[in-house]
Image (tube, coloured by chain):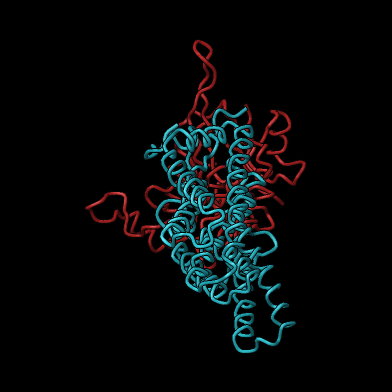
Amino acid sequence: MTTTQRKPYEFMVKYQQQKDWIDGRGNFIAFAFFLGGIAGGLFLASAYFDNLLGIFVAFLLTGLMGVSYMFHLTHPMRFWRMVVRPGTSWISRGFTFIMLFGFFTVITMTLMQWAPDATAAITTFKVLAGIFAFAQSIYTGFAVSYVSAIKVWNTAIVPVLFVTCGLTGGLAILLAIMMGQDSSQIVTLENIIRVVLIALAVIIGVYLWNTTYSSSSARDAVKRLIGGSLAPLFWIGVFLFGIVVPVVISLATIGSHDPAAGLMITAVISEIIGGLALRFAILKAGMYQPLLPAD
Amino acid sequence: MRWGMAIELKRCIGCNACVLACKAEHFVPPDIFWNRVLIGEKGKYPNVSKLIYTVRCNQCADPKCVKVCPTGATQQREDGIVWIDDTKCVGCRYCMVACPYQMRSMYEDPDKNYFPGQELTEHEKIGKTLYPHTPGVVQKCVFCKERIDSGMAQGLVPGVDRDASPACVIVCPTKAIHFGDLDDPNSEINRIIKEKHGHPFHPEFDTQPSINFID
């Protein structure tokens, strides 16, 4: 198996790395998936804690996701065409979710800011926006897992993994926002983060374990992730930054009512790096099975 | 009507004439191949056999690329040919990622020519006007739909008459590639597939390819 420049005669005769969604412009779709995930997670967390600033940041991150998408496209001015095939295309569905999330979030923020007494309306639009925040977060996983040719992606765990990872990133950003606001709900938020972080670690473990048994190309992809060319990205980016550092800081601050701000910010940044590394690691791990020999 | 191919692997000598004919027919840009000849091997010494497969877009009856395309740029005609509307493609590359056969390419660099540092060849110059490719758009084999359409308009029969058949079919020196209507039970291609036990390439991908291979 090789990950270096492919020779023409090696085309689909050897394991072939997926490059369209990771090299060059493909980097931007990895960013878009990451931003969509944390924006969705941040909205859900902010809506739960009634944090208007968090909702606003989630809206901004969704805008950034859109920008990242535009950089990915070779004909970005035709982006409006991406709504026409929601029946079969996950990209089209995702684009629809993003727009609806943006629409309902703007209404929610407007009501929360200028009509705070309209609780019924706020709750209604918050729930609607929340549904599309979740959809925006999970669709990226479905877009990836739909690709049946890439066995390391083609598993039902990928959407769960992406949405959980988005939620951890979103919760981490909300923690940073709440620290600036001197909120009394930080302890509750920290407890939620601990649970979600452990859940993320378990899901990553189950994903790798389960994928190992799906096919030879998936097994090779997992080997590349844990012991091959992608091992630094996986162990340093995903495992160390995404799980170990936040979990250690999180456990170290149990019972502390006033943990050091520097420590908390380190955990937040570490978690965000981990989330980004996870998207890159999984997209980079995508391998196509050779067409030859054909039985 | 559903156009399809039957490829006799024992007849294919791996000469790449089909690849060159396709390049010439569609003025396919450098580094892009609408069809390829895959050469592999099977077994272990001393029982080794060489595998030669001429491959192109399978024009699947249930194509993943059509399903994943968010804009409807990748479409399927009534005769089963899958093609890309250049004016609708946004270049998201989802179709490229989703194609299990990896038969799609992105045309990115319009300034790239076959002989870097030199002028365009006459063939390349003609291609720029006769068959212009849109940069930033995905492209692939379309079973020479232009030849089929113009041939049929003249009353010719694809797979029988040269001017109505795909370039790779008519150029094959060993007549390894057969072309015809898969929906016609009396067609020559169906007879060949039935008699010689044709089978699709990697049926496990579950896309119902229109190209059958005969061992």
Between B207 and A218, the residue placed more toward the observer is A218
Between A254 and A78, the residue placed more toward the observer is A254
Relative to A195, is A61 above or below?
Answer: below
Between A251 and B79, the residue placed more toward the observer is A251
Relative to A263, is A229 above or below?
Answer: above
* Chain A drawn colour: cyan
Q: Can I make out residue B68 in this image?
A: yes
Residue A204 position, x and y percent, is: 58, 43
Residue A185 position, x and y percent, is: 60, 68
Between B205 and B78, the residue placed more toward the observer is B205
Position of residue A96 in the picture relative to residue A74 (left or right): right
Quarter occupied by residue A292:
top right
* Chain B drawn colour: red
Residue B4 position, x and y percent, is: 65, 44
Relative to A50, is A14 above or below?
Answer: above
Q: Residue furthest right?
A: B185
Q: Residue furthest left?
A: B117
Position of residue A240 in the picture relative to residue A144 (left or right): left
Q: Can I make out residue B160 in this image?
A: no
Residue A105 position, x and y percent, is: 61, 76
Q: Please identify the quadrant where the C terminus of chain B is shown.
A: top right
Q: Residue at x 31, y 53 (%)?
A: B113
Q: Residue at x 31, y 49 (%)?
A: B114
